[in-house]
Image: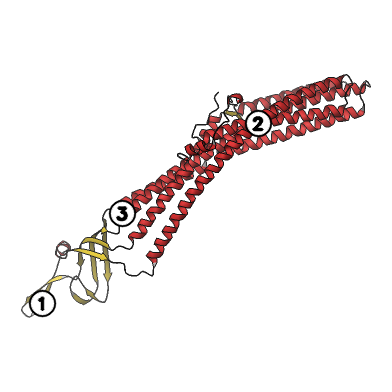
Amino acid sequence: MIQRKPAMKYFKYGSSVLIACAISVSASAQKTITIREALDQALRNNLQVKQAVFQSSLSEEDVLQAKMDLYPSVSGTVQGSKNWGLSFDQTAGTLINTSVTQAGASVTGNMLLFGGFQKVNQIKANKYQLLSNQTNVDKVKNDLVLQVVTKYLEALSNKDMATAAKQQVALSTEQLEAQKYNYEVGNKTLADLSQAKSQLATDELNLVTAQNAYDLSILDLKQLMEMNPVNDIALEKPPLPDVAKLVSSYVAEDIYQEAVQQYPDIKVAEYNTLVALKNIDIAKGGFYPQLSIGAGYGTNYSSQAGDRHIVGDQIIVTPVSLGRQLDRNKNTNVFAQLSIPIFDNYRRNITLRKAKISYESAVNDERLAKNNLNKVVNQAVLDLRTAEKKYYSTQENFKSASDAFEVLKQRYDVGLANAVELSTQQTAKNKAEFDFIQARYDFIFRSKVIDFYLGRPITFNN
């Protein structure tokens, strides 16, 4: 046994060195990100933002397509065939009963002169849809920014609570060691020692809970940034604003009147209303006649085509070359077409009625969006005022609980208080500290929500 002690000592020392190295390597691999970096990475990588950008790009193509529909359409056709047996050769102008090779080519152009202004209104509708989708990109980005800031501050809050929980565990550990010593020398009872152990177990549970909440916040933040969950990151604590300088005396109506002019959700609803209004004009255009003009050019070739010559009492057919046939068989045509709608099983009427219903629905959605904005703005103002009151209340409560704990600890040290009273007061102090940390971050966050609705950039500089 005497020879094994140095070996065990070296083993423990080596293990400590290995653990320290592992922690050092892990820390070096950990990446610290700022809130600005978190926002930039989320806006750059988030799949919902990319999906909104894709939809906006599709709308740009729809606008281009609608504009191009105003131009004439031109199409060309080239065809060839090989026939055997009895058939009528249109190029040769005769009935034949042999193999024949035929070919033809044509070009046709068509242009709509008047179609009830449907194409013009379609361009306008597509432009409004493009503006709606472009604004929707801003909406998705705005929502994402608020989510990232929420999770970032939530993670910082949970980290501070975990730090406070660690300090409480350290304090409870010291108290437990003191209780063990006092119990061994007979100054404290077994009940005092058990109470100290119970307090340490409670504080360790609070630490695990706080650390788990922090880990979940980090995971949510990684998902918003589309970051691999296995990546180890740490958050840089930004210079948080002085709570005493935060403004809470906002008027909800003033915020709403400013927000409604620029809030993306409202803009999207307004553009959708304009799209629905243009769709009514498009549907009305279906009741007008359509006038179109066009022109065509074509030629063809047949292996059986030839020039006939009468020599004596015989008809001699001389084959005609390809080039000569193409030149001789060419034809040109122009046309005008007036299409008058008479009865189409009530489709145009139903289309118009559906367009009007869609417009009413879009108007209702716009009103609903404005009502929702008004509601959330009023709620944000109330939340800010509540958060302010809660902050100062928890601040005072934490100060009182800390003072009470120090006084009770002094009384306990001289034997004027028991372990249960000390443990109860320590638990109250811990809860007061956690409440104060949460209230401080909540107050800061609620003030940033107001900035968000006012269209201000969310920053944390003093």
Q: Looking at the image, tell me whether mark 2 or mark 3 is earlier in sequence order.
A: 3
The residue mark sitting in front, 2 or 3, is: 2
66 relative position to 197: left or right? left
- Find numbered disc 2 in the image and state the secondary structure of the residue it sits on: helix
Marks 2 and 3 sit apart, C-alpha to C-alpha, by: 62 Å
Q: Identify residue for label 2.
A: 389
Residue at 45% x, 51% y: name it: 363
Marks 1 and 2 sit apart, C-alpha to C-alpha, by: 115 Å
Marks 1 and 3 sit apart, C-alpha to C-alpha, by: 54 Å
- Residue 301 location, x and y as percent? 20, 66
Which residue in the rendered view is the most extreme toward the bottom? 313
Quick one: quadrant of the N terminus? top right
Q: Check the image and report above or below for 232 versus 327.
A: above
Q: Check the image and report above or below for 352 versus 404.
A: below
Residue type at mark 3 is Asp
Q: Looking at the image, tell me whether mark 1 or mark 3 is earlier in sequence order.
A: 3
The quarter of the picture where residue 262 lies is top left
The quarter of the picture where residue 157 lies is top right
Q: Identify residue for label 3.
A: 69
Q: Residues within 10 Å of mark 1 (few under 14, many from 20)?
A: few
